[in-house]
Image (cartoon, grey):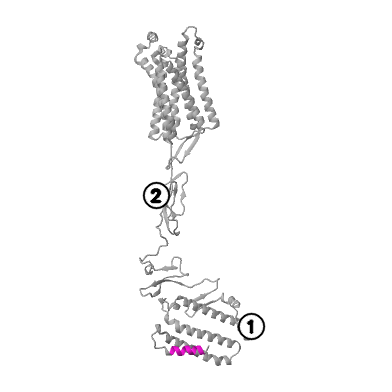
Amino acid sequence: MGVLPLGSFTVAFLARNLPDKFNEAKFITFSKLVFCNVWVSFLPTYQSTNGKMMVAMEIFCILSSRTGLLGCIFIPKCSNDTLRLSYLDITMSDQSYTVYTAVYAVAWTLHEMFLVRSEMEFNIDGDKRIVHPSKLHSFLKNVHFNNSAGNQVVLDTKRKSVANYDVLNDVTFGNDTKVLVKVGEFIPQAPLGQDFIIQEKAIVWHTGKGKPPQSRCSTVCGPGFQKKAQEGKPLCCFDCAPCPEEHISNHSDADQYVKCPEDQYPNQERNQCLPKVVTFLAYEEPLGMALASLATCFSLFPALILWIFVKHKSTPIVRANNRDLSYILLISLFFCFLCSLLFIGRPTAAHCLLRQTTFGVMFTVAVSSILAKRITVVLAFRATRPGSRSRKWMGTRVPTFVVLFCTMIQVMLCAIWLLLSPPFPEADTHSDRKHIILGCNEGSLIGFYFVLGCMGVLALGSLTVAFLARNLPDTFNEAKFITFSMLVFCSVCISFLPTYQSTKGKMMVVMEIFSILSSSTGLLACIFMPKCYVILLQPHRNTRKTLKNNVKA
């Protein structure tokens, strides 16, 4: 160990004038002089001391010689602001200071351990001077000291480190020279918000654009879009796909979209859910107000005609057309017009139960009254034939029985419908993306179509009887008017069914109200308007003599 330092010293001394970076030969020469002086001083001292002092002298010689080598060779290469990082000078980077601190910590640990052992009363021979790593650990983990640079070194895990940390920027210049430039620091003891300091303008990025490098090959997916991975490419490469219907994403680079609740809908950008507006055919809106006004006004017409018929009940035209059936027909049409009001307003359980069934029963009464009127006319003319059996069916009982029988069938159908699967209020959140449509679910569609079918059968029956009796002598040709009114009703029903199936929400309710008003108006106008015209404007035709002349004709 003594020959090698002398050899190194001789070679370095001979090469001291050769060109060398940082004049390294001179530094090596000086470091070897320090090393030789230490060991020349150590030998006589080692021979003259015993016990603890001899061990202390050994440690001192080790530390001083190693420190001389480190300080003379490497310290001149370090600077306060920058650290050269070229290939030949990599050992002078910040890692050198870490190595130095680690060696210093081990030396400090050995010192502490030997001090503890020296206090124990026993002689230390040569074999016991060997330090095993397992015994060193218990002292090393509790080290807390200041190194020669004045920095605090803490290896105790129970204590909070007070060391500051520098943020270094690796800068490469055009001549391939690399330098670490300090651009910030971290101070654990500083207040929150001031503990981390960074100078962004001092950072030199290697992207060539003066901007931080991107860790992705795709642009940011904004709100309303979802990341969709590109097949065969890294995870940082993706496409931005718009969120599907009823879904949103309210932050950038969303991996998954979120579905809006049923009472909300996504906005146009699909980054926010907006509440749906509750809608129904209300009295306050123009369409509901117009339909309610029409229904109320039209209901006044059968009431007015009924008053006219009651006032002129003794006239031939009122008596000739079965006065009682006319009264029943007018009253049923009055309620048919008012039934349309049940379809307007916020749907409730009572409205849903009553609106279809009430109209079905009332309109069945009206159509069955027309059917009874036609049957009465047919039986009356057949009874005039000699030997006809139709005379026993003459009287007021047959028309009343026809009306009651048809009405009871419709009432039974409605009762079965309400018992098995009654209509109920329903909030439709799917037909319109921006609205919640309040309406009535008909429950059993079979029951609903059975009720409509009963009215349709009666209408077809009335149309058939009226058509067959169109050539019979009849006052004011009522058979033709009834035929036309039934044609109007059947046309409305045929148009209503496909439209009812294809519309939703308020328009479906509007179609139902329109069908009720148009069919009721058709019956009222075709049957009673000609009679009112004669009663009010041509009273000379409302006489028994005119009636007999029409029958003879």
Residue 491, given in percent of the width and then of the height, sits at: 41, 26
Q: Magenta segment range?
A: 3-13
- Along the horizontal axis of the image, is 118 left or right of 527? right
Q: Which residue is mark 2?
A: 269
Q: Residue at x 40, y 64 (%)?
A: 213
Secondary structure at numbered mark 2: loop
- Which quarter shows the C terminus? top left
Q: Residue at x 42, y 68 (%)?
A: 197
Residue at coordinates 53% horizontally, 85% vertically from top-left?
62
Tell me if residue 189 comes above or below residue 542 in the rendering.
Answer: below
Place of residue 219 in the rendered image (x, y in percent of width and height, measured from the top left):
39, 57
Kind of residue at disc 1: Met
Q: Residue furthest right?
A: 122
| Quarter of the figure with residue 302 | top left
Query: Label 2 vs label 1: CA separation?
Result: 81 Å
* Residue 439 rendering spot, x and y as whole percentages: 46, 36
Looking at the picture, tell me which residue is in the foreground, 422 or 73: 73
What kind of element bears circle 1?
loop
Q: Residue beneath label 1, please?
A: 120
Amino acid at pointer 2 = Glu
Q: Viewed as shown, does residue 535 lie left or right of 361?
A: left
Q: Residue furthest left?
A: 537
Predominant secondary structure, magenta span: helix
